[in-house]
Image: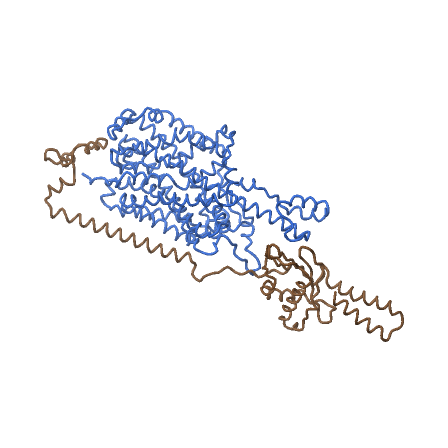
Chain colours: A blue, B brown
Amino acid sequence: MEKTRPLWANPLQFVFACISYAVGLGNVWRFPYLCQMYGGGSFLVPYIIMLIVEGMPLLYLELAVGQRMRQGSIGAWRTISPYLSGVGIASVVVSFFLSMYYNVINAWAFWYLFHSFQDPLPWSVCPLNGNHTGYDEECEKASSTQYFWYRKTLNISPSLQENGGVQWEPALCLLLAWLVVYLCILRGTESTGKVVYFTASLPYCVLIIYLIRGLTLHGATNGLMYMFTPKMEQLANPKAWVNAATQIFFSLGLGFGSLIAFASYNEPSNNCQKHAIIVSLINSFTSIFASIVTFSIYGFKATFNYENCLKKVTLLLTNTFDLEDGFLTASNLEQVKGYLASAYPSKYSEVFPHIKNCSLESELDTAVQGTGLAFIVYTEAIKNMEVSQLWSVLYFFMLLMLGIGSMLGNTAAILTPLTDSKIISSHLPKEAISGLVCLVNCAIGMVFTMEAGNYWFDIFNDYAATLSLLLIVLVETIAVCYVYGLRRFESDLKAMTGRAVSWYWKVMWAGVSPLLIVSLFVFYLSDYILTGTLKYQAWDASQDDRL
Amino acid sequence: MAKADLSAAWIFFFLTLPCVFHPERMLWLLFFLVTAIHAELCQPGAANAFKVRLSIRTALGNKAYAWDTSEEYLFKAMVAFSMRKVPNREATEISHVLLCNVTQRVSFWFVVTDPSKNHTLPAVEVQTAIRMNKNRINGAFFLNDQTLEFLKIPSTLAPPMDPSVPIWIIIFGVIFCIVIVAITLLILSGIRQRRRKNKEPSEVDDAEDKCENMNTIENGIPCDPLDMKGGHINDAFMTEDERLTPL
């Protein structure tokens, strides 16, 4: 008889673990982008509908399966039907892929965090060129934040084929990131349970501080108004609905087996229905909260850039026509331009190509997602704030907490089936299994620290998990409802928790959610087939822009 | 312009002495000649001439001073001072620096002439001199490299502070050591706990110990042998174990 399964010390640890896993970087850098692209405030409509119809039922399903079967994903699905153990193995493999590349983001966050203790921030100034007469050329053409990201952090090569060598600085940071993750999962639920108190709550503290700071920044309201004004016509765009469904799906982390793993450490009588609703609501609320912060930062950055652009145009005109210093201001710029065009037509036509049309809307329109948002746009906004070191440290610390929280879930998804398996756990203690998993992941993760590493990262990020997860969750839902039997599952839950399962959940599990997932799956497949050869964006050092 | 007047006055003096033949015409001719030479030396785009641009209001805001002839004099003095630092040019005087085309911007052109006031000094010398003393010139006008520009003379930018050991490695090292120490402590304590657990069963009665580890005892008979002897464990029904009240 095996020893009793380790349990969470109290239900709060379980809730915090789920929140810390679900609330990750996607809430911060993907949701604001989607919100901006698909109609601002009106994107919330499909988002909330998908949350109720797809997110909550599937989350409840996974938690219930884990709590009922009291094993990791492989064991749980084998129990439901021995033919379905493949689903569990698929989950573990996908989790393995994810943990390989996800921790690289934590490595980058560490890198930026360590560099935030310098004055001035290293990404706020361009380095000088060889003879100290000007700034480095690549940095001049791009911006100093882009230069720091692409050259100093990644040292990116021009294409995927040119692999370059392993960069020792990101490699060290990756090693540290894996050591920190190992420290947190070392003792299983005992250590994880305590760590999640921090990883779940600290990001909210930082977000609130940033909200207050962000809303008081000059130009923040421009960003907020622009992004949140609903564009109702986007509701008719099917892409908005597909993206809302996808975002809910991936944001909750369904299908990886982490939720099953976490729930398997629960008391059987735990009210997982309540927890499922709480976790999904908090996850969505955090997305919206983070997008308010992001949009105020956007507004600040756009206003700052717009005013800089105006200053440059003013300087150019003042210098060309030798006007009095301080005469040209933003308010009389247009008038004076008109006067100069009529009074000195030849000279004006010479300088005209260099005069940029500064527009606040075009600055606000630059929608960025992913690592670009986190490491370029935010750092650009931070370097213009006062006491930028403090804000930078807070921000990257928050990114770290979010990333490590998600990593805990990912590694739990891999480790729980391994420690459950009697063959492995009889030979090796828990610490050794965790150590081995971390070591293997770290070694493979060194690929992402090479010069072409960011391209590999993009490829993994876009293609590693998408279709597989949809398939896994689809099979999960069908397995529970039709193979195991919905009625049997319902009676199990009632016996376990003491509460009946309402008709709403049954309808969702049996009908609506599988249909939704099938349509998402079909959409993605057709998208891949229609796109033809898959592409990636490369950094061109001579033009300093993405190809 | 004072120089032109001075030279004109001297020429007038010398001319009035011996020459009686068309004195006024000669006088005016030479006057124009001198001013023409000076005008040719300092011209926008002339050889060895440099354009200077000041942005006083941008730099100082409300405390901006007006640009007048006294400020021009100070500028000439600073340029002459810079030229004096160049070997072979220690004799440069303020009067050798010519300014022209002062605009509202404030921008103007200047040249530095040699003591004979007929030729301008080569641009390279002036460039080197200005570059070496740019800080002093900036300081005299309360400006910096962005607000006091010498077009065609690039300023040497100050390199950013570069500590011998990058700061990030120090912080990295600190956190790395803390994490390693914490991991070692946790692993060691885990090993010690397991060793203690393995020692305990040898001190306590076996049967009783087995009873404590399992909560599957019914009527005093441990269920363990029942589970292990043949048969196949159906995991789906394992949860029923917890329904039995533990002893």
| Image side of residue A388 versus residue B33, left or right | left
| Image side of residue A151 versus residue A445, left or right | right
Q: What is the quadrant of residue A47 in the picture?
A: top left
Residue sitting at the far bottom: B18
Do we see residue A162 in this rendering?
yes
Quadrant containing the C terminus of chain B in the rendered view: top left
**Coordinates of residue A20 in the picture (x, y in percent):** 35, 41
**Coordinates of residue A246 in the picture (x, y in percent):** 42, 33
| Image side of residue A57 versus residue B222, left or right | right
**Coordinates of residue B98 in the picture (x, y in percent):** 71, 65
Do we see residue B131 in this rendering?
no
Q: What is the quadrant of residue B1 in the picture?
A: bottom right
Q: Is residue A475 above or below residue A430?
A: above
Q: Residue at x 13, y 41 (%)?
A: B210
User: Foreground residue, B70 or A446?
Assistant: B70
Residue sitting at the far right: B21
Residue sitting at the far front: B62
Please count the marks in the image: 0
User: Foreground residue, A539 or A161?
Assistant: A539
**Coordinates of residue A445 in the picture (x, y in percent):** 39, 47
Q: What is the quadrant of residue A430 in the picture?
A: top left
Q: Is residue A133 above or below residue A257?
A: below
